[in-house]
Amino acid sequence: MNSTIPTEELRSITLSVYRFDPGKDKKAYMQDIEIEVPVNKDLMVLDALVLAKKQETSLSFRRSCGEGVCGSDGMNINGKNGLACVTPLSEAIKGEKLVVKPMPGLPVVRDLIVDMKQFFDQLEKVKPYLITKDEAPEQERKQSPEEREKLDGLYECILCGCCSTACPSFWWNPDKFLGPAALLQSWRFIADSRDQATEERLDDLDDAFSLYRCHGIMNCVSVCPKGLNPTEAISNIRKKLINRKK
Amino acid sequence: MKGIFGSGTKDFLAVRITALILLVYCIYLTFFVFHNAPISFDVWEGLFQNVFMKIFTTLFLLSFSVHTWVGTWAIGSDYLTIARMGSLGPIVNKLYRTLCALIVGCVTLWSLIIIW
Ligand code: SF4
Ligand code: SF4
Ligand code: FES
């Protein structure tokens, strides 16, 4: 039985989905699921997955907001990481087939769901919060509009993991190289005029792996669904490291 | 892992600065060869008799050894690891590093002996 959404003309496409249930399967496999999608209307990849799930109810994936805000449905769509909810089917599909796999490099929990522990462990290392040493002012720590502007392109990260799991350096050393997402957050706090732990933050990054394993391949930039630029953030931190007298 | 020179930044600078020296040397040599083409043995020998060239070549060789030593270490720590090769990783990496040391050491020493 094919699932459809109520609309006029329909066409059939094949969703080739990565399947793995650790309780059942010895090895992962790809499953082809036929779905019907409207001819005159574009869907998002997430909609296609929801249609597929109506047939294959055991198909598992994460999703929440459905509009590119929560960062929970990062996956590998026809070879490129992205958020299923904001990736139009028309852009992603090649021919009549759409191949969907979990984000590469992280352990698969089930089907399209990966274990993000390594990703969040690395984020934790950069202390992604404001560190201050002065006594707290009565009301708030002020920032000029120019200082605030420096955080544009940094604070918008939704921690979807698309960038880090597209980064070969993160695949090779996920426990030592922090990865683009964590490094973008590191720069977000180094660049914050209210933060007072720049030196300590830089000290923590100045080993052979944490930051310097970035080889500037820019996979991270090309996949970020929010259009952010982790490579630039990394190069800003690198400049700071090189220019300080140590 | 603090890196070969004690910090990530020092390793990074070592690789970049030595790369620059290697590049300048190669450009100079290419320019020399084209400028004096067709090159004879005497011209070639004359070039390396020059003290400036001996010092420049020594600098090139030292840069070469630093550059390749740090660079090959980075490659090994990306690919020849437990994560990628299982328990064989560290053993293969040791062998690889020994081979790197032998090649870099021999090439540098041998060349220095020839130059001086
Ligand atoms: S930088 Fe972009 S791709 Fe990376 S985690 Fe943030 S939003 Fe996702
Ligand atoms: S630029 Fe750096 S962080 Fe981004 S994908 Fe490449 S190696 Fe990874
Ligand atoms: S479901 Fe929230 S970002 Fe896609």
Image (spheres, coloured by chain):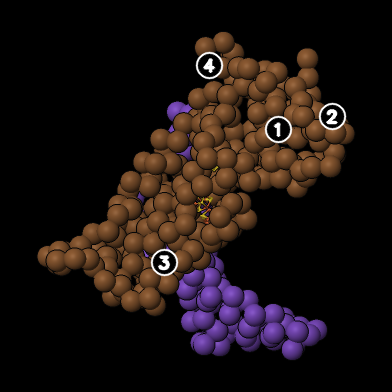
Chain colours: A brown, B purple
Q: For the residue marked with disc 4, what is the amino acid?
A: Pro
Given the image, on which type of amino acid does mark 2 rest?
A: Ser
Pointer 2: what residue?
A12
Q: Secondary structure at mark 3?
A: loop
Circle 3 residue: A151
Q: Label 2 crowding class (10 Å Cα cut-off): few <14, some 14-19, many 20+? A: some
Question: Do callouts 3 and 4 mark residues in contact (Cβ within 8 Å)?
Answer: no
Please indicate whether residue B84 sits to the left or right of residue A186 in the image: right
Residue B46: x and y, percent? 63, 87
A178 vs A215: above or below: above
Q: Nearer the viewer, residue A43 or B77?
A: A43
Counting residues from the N terminus, which is met first, the one under dot 3 or under dot 4? Answer: 4
Question: Do pointers 3 and 4 mark residues of a single chain?
Answer: yes
Left or right of B92? Residue A59 is: right
Q: Nearer the viewer, mark 3 or mark 1?
A: 1
- Are the residues flagged by discs 2 and 3 in contact, CB closer than 8 Å? no
Q: CA distance from mark 1 to mark 4?
A: 24 Å
Going by the numbered disc 3, the residue's amino acid type is Leu
**Residue at which label 1 appears:** A48
- Measuring 67% from the left and 20% from the top, which residue is drawn there? A54
The residue pinned by badge 4 equals: A22
Foreground disc of the pair 3, 4: 3
Instruction: Give the mark nearer the N terminus: 2 vs 3.
Output: 2
Quadrant in the picture for the N terminus of chain A? top right
| Residue pictured at 54% horizontal, 23% vertical | A110
Q: Earlier in the sequence, mark 2 or mark 4?
A: 2
* Nearer to us in this view, A109 or B88: A109
Sequence-first tag of 2 and 1: 2
| Mark 4 neighbour density, 10 Å: few (under 14) some (14–19) many (20 or more) | few
Discs 2, 1: same chain: yes
Reading the chain from its start, which is encountered first: label 1 or label 4? 4
